[in-house]
Image (tube, rainbow, N blue to C red):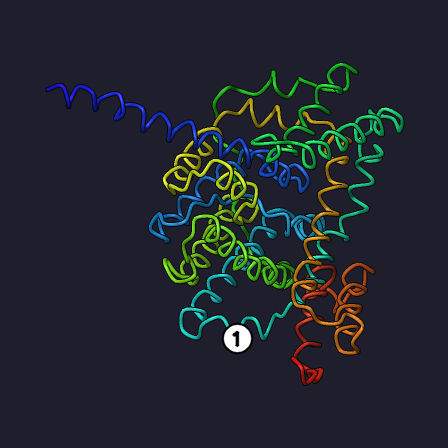
Amino acid sequence: MTDQTSALPGMAEAPLKTLLTGAQMLFVAFGALVLVPLLTGLDPSVALFTAGVGTLLFHGITRVTVPVFLASSFAFIAPIQGSVANFGIPATMGGLMAAGLVYVVISQVVRLKGTAWLHRLLPAVVVGPVIMVIGLALAPVAVSMATGETSDHIGYGPAIFLSMTSLLVTLVLAVFGRGIVRLIPIMGGIVTGYGLALMMGLVDFSPVHEAAWLSIPAFTAPSFHWAAILFMIPVAIAPAVEHIGDMVAIGSVTRKNYLEKPGLHRTLLGDGLATTTASLFGGPPNTTYSEVTGAVTLTRAFDPRIMVVAACIAVCLAFVAKLGALLQTIPGPVMGGIMTLLFGSIAVVGMNPLVRAGHSLTAPRNLVVISLILVFGIGGMQLGGGQFTLQGVSLAALVGIVLNWVLPRAEEE
């Protein structure tokens, strides 16, 4: 009798600990999660919902074996902005659905053929520069928001003050922060900038007052246009390759080989179906979050069920309409200051595959491939016309794949 009674507190504490740890994981991912919809004109409440649903779908496919959380992908920010401007949100969702299906196709080829073909098709000399294009192509957007060009009611001086303060706080937390604080630099920068904007009277709360406490998010069904689909499909290439690195990273933390169990084909399939499902509701594409991997490393919370709890909390928060309205009151310069660091860091991440590969960047073949990917991707060049125009990241990825296939490889490769 004594043994049973003493066991009860532990039984009661375990679910509570899992709940609190899951909430913490969502808190770590929250700033980056809502940043993508705020920058692309999508609904942050829908993004919360699709992040939760996508994570649950991923864990269903992988049988709750990998401690990861899926949420809004930064790689698609520039393509979504361009696609929304040219084709509208429903057509953009159709393109993102096709991009998710690219993951699904790759997962099945990996299941049948392994991963060697993927590395041959998309070596570091292609993937690295394409990721760099994703970050550098967004630099003008970050500067415009940081200087207040996109905010009618905020002048240049206040905009610079807000953006640079938000940037400074984000930098300090990222470099000097310790523990859980170091994992939420974006959240810290947003909160600080938002607080300053409140004191300066630059926040309009009328949308929050008008919003109900609970309501169904503004879901948007996809429509299908060949132009939007062709524009978006090549963008899926770099994140699909990065997915392998994410699985290796979380595996090194937990000391498990997720490429074998549950298998790369299952994790890719889960990632792809999560992105496809997100597009059905009007949410941004999903990807595994490195912030959450960092939190797992710090807290040693290796139980995948914690991520399931975080996903359930995200789905519930999506129906709190006042939260979505509050997120949309964040001034543009606050987001712009953080974006200047974020987009630059994406470009730096793109350099990592090139550095790790150890090839000479000035070797003729590598020089040609890398330079043309960067110029075609950033220079505003377009290929085709009418409904079949490729530009930006899509064009850069296509150019890189073709050049890598056509140009003869050096003997040492």
Residue 77 falls left or right of residue 2: right
Residue positioned most to the left: 1
Amino acid at the residue labelled 1: Trp
Compared with residue 128, is residue 21 higher up or lower down, i.e. above or below? above
Front residue of 117/235: it is 117
Front residue of 302/399: it is 302
Tell me what residue is drawn at x 63 percent, y 51 percent. Answer: 76
Front residue of 29/140: it is 29
How many numbered discs, if any? 1
Residue 339 % position (x, y) = 73, 40
Quadrant in the picture for residue 146: top right
Tell me what residue is drawn at x 63 percent, y 59 percent. Answer: 235
Residue 378 % position (x, y) = 79, 58
Tell me what residue is drawn at x 76 percent, y 61 percent. Answer: 377
Which quarter of the image is occupied by the C terminus?
A: bottom right
Which quarter of the image is occupied by the N terminus?
A: top left
Residue that mark 1 sits on? 117
Mark 1 falls on what kind of element?
Answer: helix
Label 1 crowding class (10 Å Cα cut-off): few <14, some 14-19, many 20+?
Answer: few
Quadrant in the picture for residue 210: top right
Residue 143 falls left or right of residue 50: right
Tell me what residue is drawn at x 53 percent, y 25 percent. Answer: 321
Compared with residue 206, is residue 241 higher up or lower down, i.e. above or below? below
Residue 327 falls left or right of residue 56: right
Residue 35 % position (x, y) = 64, 37
Residue 201 % position (x, y) = 77, 15
